[in-house]
Image: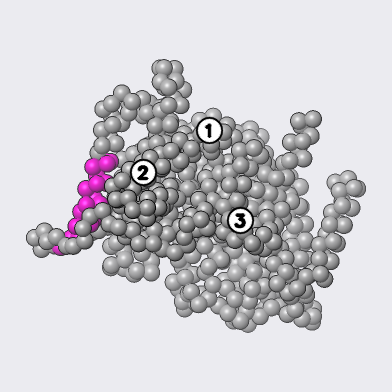
Amino acid sequence: MSRFPLMALAVALAALALVPLALKNYGIYLLSLWCVYVMAGMGLNLTVGYAGQMSIGHAAFVAIGAYTAAILMKAGVSFYLALPLCALNCFIVGVALGFPALRVQHHYLAFATLGFNVLVYLFVRNEEWLTGGTFGISGIQRPGFFGLSLDGSAAFFYFVYGSTILLAGALWGIVRSPWGRAFAALRDNPIRAESLGVNIVAYTLLAFAIGAGFAGVAGAYFAALVQFIEPGPFHLSASLMMLLMVIVGGPGRFFGPMLGAAIVILLPEWLRGLKDWYLVMFGLAVVALMTWLPGGLLSIPDRLRSSR
Amino acid sequence: MISGTATGAIYALAALGFTLLWQASGTINFAQGEFVMVPAFLMLAALSLGLPLWLAFVLACAGSAAILGLGFKRIVVDPLLRHGVIPLVIATLGLSIALKNLVKAGYSSQPLPFPGVFPDGLLSLGAVRVSVYDIGTLAVAAALVLLLQAFLTRTITGRAMQAVAQNTEAAAVLGIDVQRMVLYVFLANALLAAVAALLVTPAYLAKFDMGDAIGLKAFYAAIIGGFNQARGALLGGVLVGVLENLAGAYVSPAYKEAIALVLFLFVILVRPEGLLGRSEERKV
């Protein structure tokens, strides 16, 4: 990356860090929620954008992360220990689900993840002994940070914000590594990639499982942010929204999920007066976007450049 | 068992439309459930104007064919097909959200009662008592499927539609008007959905998100039976309906939905082409 975009990025990050000063609690909460969805979206982008597979069950992984964190923390385990366990848990489940589904390629990962999402939703709703059923798990404690309390909404925002930046850095590393380049090679031309010695199934599986791990981390932060989890936010429709988030922003583009999450999480709050009409417009906009800009909003600059 | 078969028959109708669309144009339609919901509300709107049910149904069929058949193909599918399958799938997702919320915001967010086509009541067949409604539903769905099957295998147009589904290029070479056949498939899908709406709505009540459950079940049914086989959709639909009912009665109502789901996952992992499907060659 040359110098100018790097500086622009630093300025944008700093500006975003100042925003909470001008907001009330609810606004800060929304920004934190946006960060959580960005984390999950980055993971999904790895699967959808970089490895070119459809996953319609990302909310299930967020659910696994959130419930793992909540149950562990209720049992007295520290957040910092629960966090890697959430990621690991989701990674393992991702491998277990992805391995059989990816053997058959095509759209089958999409189908399997869809079924998986419904199954996880039913499980958390019905197994009251473990998940509290529809009553959920309440009173989840927020972690501290080296003795600092994160109970205030602004303090917690900075915690989530910092974590998101760290996670984004990790993703940047993955995508830039020879490994990450293999993901993109797979998506662009699987047959050619295979002939160059890339093991299609192994790499796609890895991308999917790492994506699931990201969702697990997002789930842990979600539990800590909301402090009360119930099955609602992990319904299949949430997965579909997350998928749209990534696609609208620009699949396979690093900043796609950031933009997409803003459109899905922050914009509706701004346009509150529209109520349900917002979603009507959003749905129609997705159709229009797919017709004219299948590469997502972030492909606009490229499009302008190539048409010149 | 019978009521399960009747429910299954409705799923089968929606699933059949699903597989037809898939065969003709490679489209996975995530808005299939909404394709059932919209005609239901068209009928409600017509009923509230004081029209009789049969007239409302005819109008809903016409509206469904025009909007969800012709309109869907021209406005959404045609311009998107050149981008490949994934953008199209995403577009149907967007469409699903838009249709759902359009009805919610523009009509009503409450569940609304819907008049039944058949009279209520029980019929005694020897030792078992079955509801008239289930029998009626089953009869209509079965008749419709047989009719469609006959149309596809006996008439020239039907055969041409099948030829297009099997091999688009070869069909074009043989002088079949591919676009026209694909349009017929879209119209058939819209009509199947309208009939499914007529049959299912009295039991489910008309609500903006009623399509969620139906679309999902149709999806399972299509995969379980075999995505590229019309007969498969039928088997899948009935199987899903029956399993669901039996599981609800004998295993646990809470996991009623999970049974079909487990079968669905099992089929995907073990026999991805579906129970009756043929495996697809990779098109490079």
Q: Can residue B2 be seen in the rendering of this structure?
A: no
The image shows residue B83, relative to residue A263, as above or below, that is above
- Evaluate if marks 3 and 2 touch, with contact meaning CB atoms under 8 Å apart: no
**At numbered mark 2, what does the secondary structure look like: helix, strand or loop?**
helix
Q: Which region of the structure is painted magenta?
A: B129-145
The image shows residue B271, relative to residue A43, as above or below, that is above
Q: Residue furthest left?
A: B126
- Evaluate if marks 1 and 3 touch, with contact meaning CB atoms under 8 Å apart: no
Nearest to viewer (mark 1 / mark 3): 3
Dot 1 corresponds to which residue? B78
- Evaluate if marks 2 and 1 touch, with contact meaning CB atoms under 8 Å apart: no
Do dots 3 and 2 share one subunit? no
Classify residue B176 as left or right of residue B148.
right
Q: Can residue A279 be seen in the rendering of this structure?
A: yes
Label disc, if present, on residue B59 of the rendered structure: 2
Q: CA distance from mark 3 to mark 2?
A: 29 Å
- Given the image, what chain letter belongs to the residue carrying mark 1? B
Q: CA distance from mark 2 to mark 1?
A: 26 Å
Label disc, if present, on residue A278 of the rendered structure: 3
Q: Is residue B132 magenta?
A: yes
- Given the image, what chain letter belongs to the residue carrying mark 2? B
In percent of width and height, residue A56 lies at 54, 53
Q: Is residue B282 magenta?
A: no
Name the residue type under label 1: Asp
Nearest to viewer (mark 3 / mark 2): 2
Task: Give residue A74's quadrant in the image.
Answer: bottom right
> Pointer 1: residues within 10 angstroms few (<14), some, or many (20+)?
some
The image shows residue B235, relative to residue A267, as above or below, that is above
In percent of width and height, residue A304 lies at 77, 36
- Given the image, what chain letter belongs to the residue carrying mark 3? A
